[in-house]
Amino acid sequence: MKVIALDGPAGSGKSTIAGMLAEKIGFLHADSGAIYRTLTLASMQKLGAGNSPQDFGELFQKAVLDPDQLGIQVVLADGKQSNRIGQADVGREIRTPEVTSRIRFIADNVPCRNTVNRLLREFAEQTGVVADGRDMGTVVFPDTPNKFFLEASVEVRARRRYEEMLGQGSSSQSLAEIERDIARRDQEDRSRAVGALRKADDAILIDTSDLSRDGVLSRILAHIQYRF
Ligand code: DC
């Protein structure tokens, strides 16, 4: 298997970097967060979103859903990962704050994690992948020699996310709200009983706070270029 594992907290830039890196070396960008998001949206469609994330959490915990029966499909289309529910590509719908605030129930659920991990490993059987997430280097692809962990302060990550949203037209959240969300998600992601956000012992740590995207990319390339 040809795998580059790229882990890090929300907003550390890993998705952007993973996309750039995958394109550069002709690998697939496998976005594990998008699969958790798709499972979350499919669960919301099945159970209702509840009035609050807590309400949804109760619905989800009572329902005992089989993640493999939720109808999600994660497929390669035109060399990219397409996240589908039934036949519909839900690539945009999975990015809403409603989905993001309910993901933790899915991410804490071991059968859901197993489904995501299986889909990612199936991708890696078919093609070279740059896998981005929280537990790629520790749980899903522990044997790959190419592991990176991207980091940046909460403030830097919130500002990036805010500017990204403004760049797409407008931001539905203020900078302070984004900062609060990111801090909360860090706490959830780091304290998860299974698949917690953690740097693998053999991963290379890159603090992206003061680096451009190209700067991060060239550091990664410097470490992997002779391995494939
Ligand atoms: O990368 P992202 O922000 O789209 O991920 C959304 C959430 O999915 C993240 O807050 C926790 C969960 N997740 C996870 O538990 N494990 C992963 N490997 C990737 C994401």
Image: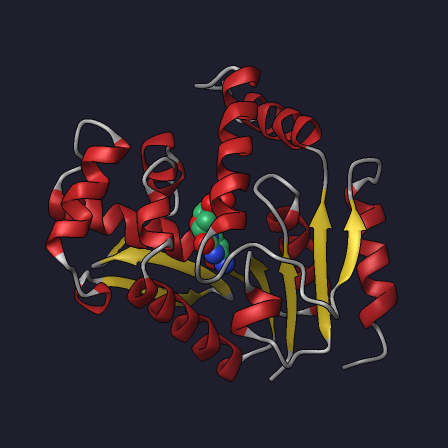
Answer whether residue 130 is visible to the viewer in this image. Answer: no
Residue found 12% across the figure and 51% down from its top: 62
Q: Is residue 21 left or right of residue 225?
A: left
Residue found 14% across the figure and 44% down from its top: 59
Where's residue 169, x and y in %? 51, 21
Between residue 201 and residue 224, name the one nearer to us.
201
Where's residue 12, x and y in %? 65, 42
Quarter in which the N terminus is drawn: bottom right
Q: Is residue 64 above or below residue 42?
A: below
Q: Is residue 195 left or right of residue 26?
A: left
Q: Is residue 136 above or below residue 179?
A: below
Quarter in which the C terminus is drawn: bottom right
Q: Is residue 150 above or below residue 57?
A: below
Between residue 113 and residue 164, name the one nearer to us.
113
Residue found 49% across the figure and 29% down from its top: 181
Q: Quadrant of residue 112?
A: bottom left
Answer whether residue 41 is visible to the viewer in this image. Answer: yes
